[in-house]
Amino acid sequence: MKEVFNLYNTLTRQVEPIRPLQADRLTVYTCGPTVYGDAHIGNFRTFIYEDTLVKALRYFGYRVKWVMNITDVGHLTSDRDEGEDKLEVGARREGTTAWAVAKKYEQSFLADSAALRMAKPDRLVRATDCIEQQITLVQELEAKGYTYCISDGIYFDTSKFPTYGQMARLDIAGLQAGARVAMQEEKKHPTDFALWKFSPTDRTRDMEWSSPWGTGFPGWHLECSAIAMSTLGKQIDIHCGGTDHIPVHHTNEIAQSEAATGKQFARHWMHTDHLLVNGGKMSKSLGNLYTLADVTARGFDPLALRLLYYGASYRSKQNFTWHSLETNQKLLDRLRQQAAELPETGEDTGNAAAPLAAFRAALANDLNMPAAVAALIETMKSPLDPAAKRAFVTEVERVLSLGLLQEPEKATAIPDKIRQLAAAREERRREGKWDEADAIRRNIEAAGYELRDAVGGGKSQIRKKAQSK
């Protein structure tokens, strides 16, 4: 019998046990990146918590099928279905095609995901690979009377879906009364949204397809419903995303999916709150829209960022500073050093059971990662026997994915020249040539790296110096 796993449900506004629709599997759908640029560290906070959720559920014995989409078309610069497709904007910015931009930043996202030790979803589906499914969904909605056509596309009539906006607690009457003139004049209601957009008549888009209504491209919201239902079924267990998706994107997903099937789309909704930077919002204009490349350029291990994310509940806002990342880098280094000193062999006599119970209780309590990490820290500094600690770390790494059992200096790429200098220093130390060893150490530090000598002798660990502000 599987253990109970409790998770907050945005739909009901309370913590509830996960109850799979089918006894033999649990379906999870997560909104993936829009690949018009590099994903930033705020995006990755959501992605890491989703990855951690899937790993925790599997750790608890659930057979999870996880699907993530790649938005490579249809995401307009405005939530009101106005503006340009972000991929087209990216193509103009880089002097290339939307297809090339999508490929470039999809690869960037996958590389960053690997550096952060995210698991690969069972299915990673591009919006452009399921155009047929999206057209079919619009046809189903059209046949049931939920759509209407205006000059720029096919729209979903939200007035015909009585529970529209229920999860987001939208004040529909207030929205109607306060509708701005800026709204697309032909739309019947301010909350109506595009299912299929027509291509402009004065130019050819990089990405456009023929449809029963004319040449064009799918609306952003359409892809997630089509992908989720074609890969996981008409009903799914858990749908994840950021809190910014609640009032528009996820609200529209629910409407179009349930209008088409007559069934509840997702039973459980998990949303991760925003990451702030220095107490404020991230934005390009402020120059604080940091990416993983910015993190590693300052000498930080990507997994120090993963550890930082664990420092706050996914349901609350979290503040990022370079100082806080430096603190987490030091904690990660210490945990790795402690793990490196544990024997690789030895029999655990069962003493890891109690700390593992605390770790599992934290996970099952609405994915309480601060408590889970606290269980790790307390265990590593406890008098627990080394074999039991090793068993504990091996288990928790299945969820935490912090690289605790890898050699510390392999956490980031260290140039061969620096490794050679470190080896030469070790040789001088063994020979008792302390002045020469110190001189080599200064050269290593001048190159931007630092050494940490093992307690009681042994091999020193190398890492790139972190640069904080």
Image: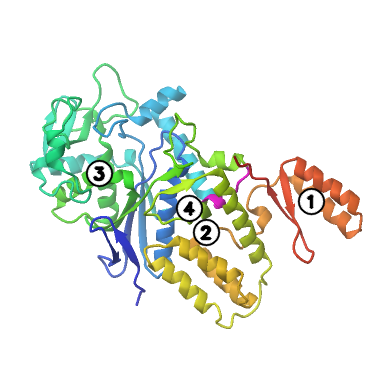
Residue 235 placed where, x, y %? 23, 57
Tell me the magenta residue range.
Answer: 299-305
Report how far apart the C-alphas of labels 2 and 1 lie in the structure.
28 Å
Q: Which residue is mark 1?
A: 422
Report how far apart the C-alphas of labels 4 and 1 lie in the structure.
32 Å
Report how far apart the C-alphas of labels 2 and 4 lie in the structure.
12 Å
Viewed as shown, does residue 226 lie left or right of 460?
A: left
User: Which structural element holds mark 1?
Assistant: helix
Residue type marked 2: Ser
Residue plotted at (36% across, 36% down): 72
Residue plotted at (48% across, 56% down): 311
Of marks 3 and 2, the one in the foreground: 3
- As for residue 102 lying within the magenta part, the answer is no
Q: Is residue 439 above or below residue 237?
A: above
Q: Which residue is mark 4?
A: 309
Residue type marked 1: Ala
Viewed as shown, does residue 263 lie left or right of 312?
A: left
Q: Does residue 466 appear anywhere in the picture? A: yes
Q: Which residue is mark 3?
A: 247
Q: Which residue is mark 2?
A: 401
Report how far apart the C-alphas of labels 3 and 1 lie in the structure.
54 Å
Q: Quadrant of the N terminus?
A: bottom left
Q: Mark 3, residues whose alpha carbon is within 10 Å: few (<14), some, or many (≥20)?
A: some
Q: Earlier in the sequence, mark 4 or mark 1?
A: 4
User: Which structural element holds mark 2?
Assistant: loop
